[in-house]
Amino acid sequence: MVERHMSLFGPKHVIGLDVGTTSIKVVDIALGKQPQIANYGTIEDDSYLMHPGNALQSSARGLVIDHITELLHTLLHALHIKKGEVYATYPIFSSFATLLDFPALSKEEVDRAIEYSFRQYVPLAPEDTHYEWLSAGEKDLTTAGGESVVGGGTVKKYFFLTAISNKNVALYEELAMRTGLKLKSIESETLSLVRVLRHNTTLSGRTIGVLDIGTYSTNIVVIRNGFVVMNRGLDSGGGDITRSIARGLGVDGIRAETIKKTQGLHYVAEQAAVYQLIYFALDFILEEAKRVFAMYATKFSEPIDEIILVGGSSSLREIEHYLADKLQIKTSVLRSLHPFTTRGAVTLADSASSELVVALGAALKAQET
């Protein structure tokens, strides 16, 4: 199934690419002082509904490059995109991510410190990976109950390190080449996600938890004062909810998906069985989110202020109310890509904002480079 919308001709365009577990999202942006979405589309391989476990990529299978190439070709053709520069993302389950802390060091000193101790965090040699680190804020130790930091000092500096193997990068390069695109950059989906949130959400002075719920994976992120400080991946998502309904009611995957989308977490007595099946499937994600948020509270001695839901499964009916009740934290679904959708009919992209956010964030990296 392909969904698309296109409009505009204008300044230089670049493409953001997000390959998920069962769908591919493409966002074409027009660069400028304020980048704008000019074109976008999604394509889904819904074969998983009849064959549970089918995926475009997973932690166990990696990228199914031939099938992804075929689907991306179809999507680009529907969007009338024949060539261009593409900024891609890789999922948390195919990468390594960790939070490091050092005393106040120069960029060169941090580079050396990370390279020296790289294997403590990533089970690969630095030369075998594509990796980057970003500042992740700091913590004043004078109010941290006497916590110590290597090298002394009163301020602990945090750095978020993310890495992917060069073999995986080569697969994305091959995908781009096969589809007539030129790969300009590849980064963690987490960094792309945060890039968009910085534009349309107040992050300064707050701690935001993000749940990006896909079909077969969930990305759990904690953003403190605008910086990523925690990132965990989970091999569970909306596809597991569909499978739970199918098994519990004895229906096929297509019927189960329809039931899921129609009822969601809206409780009605005559459909109590569906509610329970969805609840049990969501429980695994819920418990892991609780664990990550509790780890954050312990490490930084402060709570999560708000949770934002993105990803295809964030459209599940009343999911934000359900999670707010269970986690006792204000929860909302990302429903707008403001300020990137202000040109006429392209505001229709807002209806798919929670699915497009990662691809949009990837494309926006062009503004930085």
Image: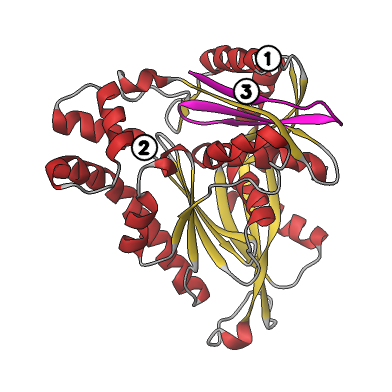
Mark 2–mark 1 Cα distance, whole angstroms, equals 29 Å
Mark 1–mark 3 Cα distance, whole angstroms, equals 12 Å
Q: Earlier in the sequence, mark 2 or mark 1?
A: 1
Q: Is residue 123 above or below residue 346?
A: below
Q: Which disc, if any, is residue 171?
A: 3
The residue lying toward the viewer, choosing from 205 and 34, is: 34
Label 2 residue SS: helix
Q: Dot 1 corresponds to which residue?
A: 179
Q: Dot 2 corresponds to which residue?
A: 238
**Which mark is in front, 2 or 3?**
2
Q: Earlier in the sequence, mark 1 or mark 3?
A: 3
Q: Main secondary structure of the magenta part?
A: strand
Q: Quadrant of residue 274?
A: top left
Identify the amino acid type marked 1. Thr
Label 3 residue SS: helix
Residue contact at pointers 2 and 3, CB within 8 angstroms: no
Identify the amino acid type marked 2. Gly
Residue contact at pointers 2 and 1, CB within 8 angstroms: no
- Residue 269 located left or right of residue 369: left
